Amino acid sequence: VFGLGYIGLPTSLMFAHEGYPVIGVDTNAETVEKLNNGETHIQEAGLQDYYRQVRAGKDFVATSEPCPADIFLISVPTPVTEDKTADLSYVRSVADTIGRLIRPGNMVILESTVPPRTCLDVIAPIIQQLSGLSYETDYDLVHCPERVIPGKILQELKENGRIIGGATRGAAERAAELYSSFVEGEIVLTDTVTAELVKLMENTYRDVNIALANEFHAVCTALGSDSCEAIDLANRHPRVNIHTPGIGVGGHCIAVDPWFIIESAPEQTQLLQTARKVNDQRPHQVASEVIEELGKLNAKSVAFFGLAYKPDVDDLREAPAVEIVRQVAQHDNLEVLVVEPYVDRLPADLSLPNVKLSSTPVAFADADVVVGLVAHREFKSLKLDGLRRKRVLDFVGMWR
Ligand SMILES: NC(=O)c1ccc[n+]([C@@H]2O[C@H](COP(=O)([O-])OP(=O)(O)OC[C@H]3O[C@@H](n4cnc5c(N)ncnc54)[C@H](O)[C@@H]3O)[C@@H](O)[C@H]2O)c1
């Protein structure tokens, strides 16, 4: 398994638990060392215990040195570049390594999220060039997109259904047999391009619907109506299900995946491009609202609750809350406190002299204004009664 992150590590452990000897390969030496010392490097419910259990059976080893295997599984990052196209450099690098190690009869599985046609137009040619092997006759090439939700990865890896796209039908069937060792959900077979598209369409659906909710919020606010109430009432219609407006879209999936469709079909994706724009503007709008309120109150300090890209996880990648705090903190002479129970240090973007990681009691005591950005479970249960004299801005409806 190439890439021992949020996807690669739990997936490795699932296979190891079923008795497949798994060699986990990661270029990050610190990650490899930590894992070989018995510790996991990511925060995920139940992962540390599960790791301990699987390691006891000695079916998993972490290394930085790739070696031959029967099955190669790719779960490396696929970020989006500044110009909003997929950075496939990690995938290419792993395909290159596999091209040098692969033997006839092996299987190559891509789990990373990629633009459509990556299996056929990027991975297969690299492997063919280096090994002379063709997916049509010599090895199995499949895309098995990952659709788990952080915070419930172990549970969803087992329970969710899987789409398996094979470069040949036989490849899809053999991969389905492999995954059925631990997947309890339905496994549906298709081709690689459809599987690549399905994964992107799922997250794009969410992005577009969140943009709609955010736009409704802006409309309601401009017209003097409470967007939460309006959406609640609209959702009483049996065929309406408007999402909840928020502070923007973050993480490495919903904010990224639509770009992979857009780059593949720019002419056909006007709605998708607009949705991205609407959601990307949201952190800036929230920061402006906070700054305006701070100005009105002549506030000297503000406490933000939450940085993660969504509730109950430690993942700050593409998190709109980080951008909001960064923008507000640009204002001189403002003390900025951040309460984020899931991290023990601030991200590089927030290493500013006036920004401090804080605790709830200190933030409540010291800040003139309290801002809710991420509805972590522990924040929702906070008692705000003692804060009557402070201004509370809740952008995610967690203290309603
Ligand atoms: N995290 C999720 O919830 C999620 C959900 C669905 C899909 N995905 C997709 O899965 C893929 C992996 O995401 P992730 O969240 O696990 O990423 P991650 O950053 O947590 O982990 C990726 C790992 O790959 C390692 N790596 C980078 N280059 C490597 C190489 N050449 N060889 C070996 N290891 C290498 C990194 O050091 C890192 O440990 C991405 O395409 C992502 O879009 C993620």
Image: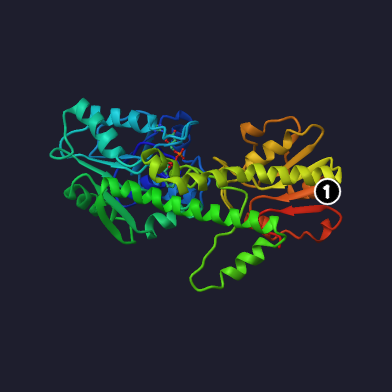
Q: Tell me the residue at 53%/73% (across/down).
A: 237
SS for dot 1: helix
Q: Nearer the viewer, residue 47 or 52?
A: 47
Q: Tell me the residue at 55%/47% (across/down).
A: 249
Number of on-image labels? 1
Residue 206 in the figure: left or right of residue 63: right
Residue 366 in the figure: left or right of residue 49: right
Q: Residue furthest left?
A: 137
Q: Nearer the viewer, residue 270 or 102?
A: 270
Quick check: which quadrant has ligand 1?
Answer: top left
Measured along the vertical axis of the image, is residue 240 above or below residue 134?
below
Do we see residue 211 in this rendering?
yes
Residue 335 screen position, x and y as percent: 79, 37
Mark 1 — residue? 365
Amino acid carrying mark 1 in the image: Ala
* Residue 137 placement: quadrant: top left
* Residue 283 placement: quadrant: top right
Q: Tell me the residue at 35%/42% (across/down).
A: 60
Few, some or many residues within 10 Å of mark 1 (<14, 14–19, 20+): few
